Image (cartoon, rainbow, N blue to C red):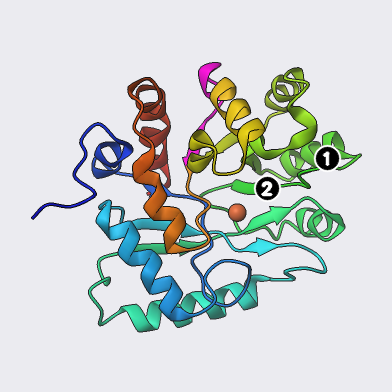
Amino acid sequence: MLSLFTDKSSLTTLFEEGFVDIHNHILPGIDDGAKTFADSLKMLEAYSKYQITQIVATPHIIQGVWPNDENSITAAYNQLLSKLNDSVYSDFTIRYAAEYMMDEGFLTLVKQKALLPIKDNMVLLEMSYFNPPLNLKELLFEVQLQGYVPILAHPERYFSYHSQFDAYLKLKQAGCLFQLNLLSLIGFYGLPSQKAALKILDKGLYDFAGTDAHKAEHLKLLKNIKKNSIIKKLKPLIENSKRFV
Ligand SMILES: [Fe+2]
């Protein structure tokens, strides 16, 4: 059967070799991602077209905006899983973690050693797109002091870093791993983020890639990442995702 997903020069080929999506908002009703179980199902359908069956759900935890905690996340997770058991998606492996905004609430959780890791001690962090926290260095230090390895989500999306590339090098030196949002590469978040993503990728500073999908439409766009030179550089990042199996 002919399909939109059969283009072998695209990212889909890499996905077929195995990919664990460590950044997405598939859990229903707890952040700005999937609103309902039906939305989650649509996302699973889109994942399955790429033969992606391993997912770590990372709902937002943002004080005063998406005040999730382990209880709200496990409730949404269990609801999704209970409905999947008898469905065509029962072969999916879905786990949960969180995407932590580095705010005051986050610091409390770090000190309590109460973070939900993607795997082992690796935690997914984000910050304001406009202003990094003033105490960013101290926060990252505290995270590592408590035994966690910080993975910074979508470094290419932080506007204040676009004009100072050195900031990325300093973050890496401070112990941060970098997770690329794949759609940044085709300008989904705007030209400045696309340029930053291509440069960070070119310099070999990314450790992982994720979709950050909030809905099925985001996943469907991934097939448009096709440029050979980009696919070549993505290969090790997709390969790295297997450590999260
Ligand atoms: Fe996200």
- Amino acid residing under circle 2: Leu
Q: Where is residue 183 in the image (x, y as percent from the top left)?
A: 49, 42
- Residue 67 in which image quadrant: bottom right
Q: Please report the residue visible at 72 percent of the width from the left and 69 percent of the height from the top.
A: 66
Which span is picked out in magenta? 201-209
> Ligand 1 is located in which of the four quadrants?
bottom right
Q: Please report the residue visible at 83 percent of the width from the left and 61 percent of the height from the top.
A: 105
Q: Please report the residue visible at 33 percent of the width from the left and 78 percent of the height from the top.
A: 84
Q: Mark 2 points at which residue?
A: 125
Question: 75 or 16, which is in the foreground?
Answer: 16
In the picture, measured across the screen, residue 124 lies left or right of residue 11, that is: right
In the picture, measured across the screen, residue 205 lies left or right of residue 162, that is: left
In the picture, measured across the screen, residue 97 lies left or right of residue 232, that is: right
Q: Is residue 194 magenta?
A: no
The quarter of the picture where the N terminus appears is: bottom left
How dense is the environment of label 2, judged by Cα within 10 Å: few (below 14), some, or many (20 and up)? many
Please tell me how many numbered marks the rendered image carries.
Answer: 2
Which element is circle 2 on? strand
Q: In this view, does 216 lie above or below 40?
A: above
How dense is the environment of label 1, judged by Cα within 10 Å: few (below 14), some, or many (20 and up)? some
Which element is circle 1 on? loop
Q: Is residue 120 above or below residue 199?
A: below
Q: Does the magenta stretch include residue 207?
A: yes
Tag 2 or tag 1, which sits nearer the N-term? Answer: 2
- In the picture as drawn, the residue positioned furthest to the left comes out as 1
Q: Is residue 245 above or below residue 76?
A: above
Q: Name the residue under label 1.
A: 132
- Amino acid residing under circle 1: Pro
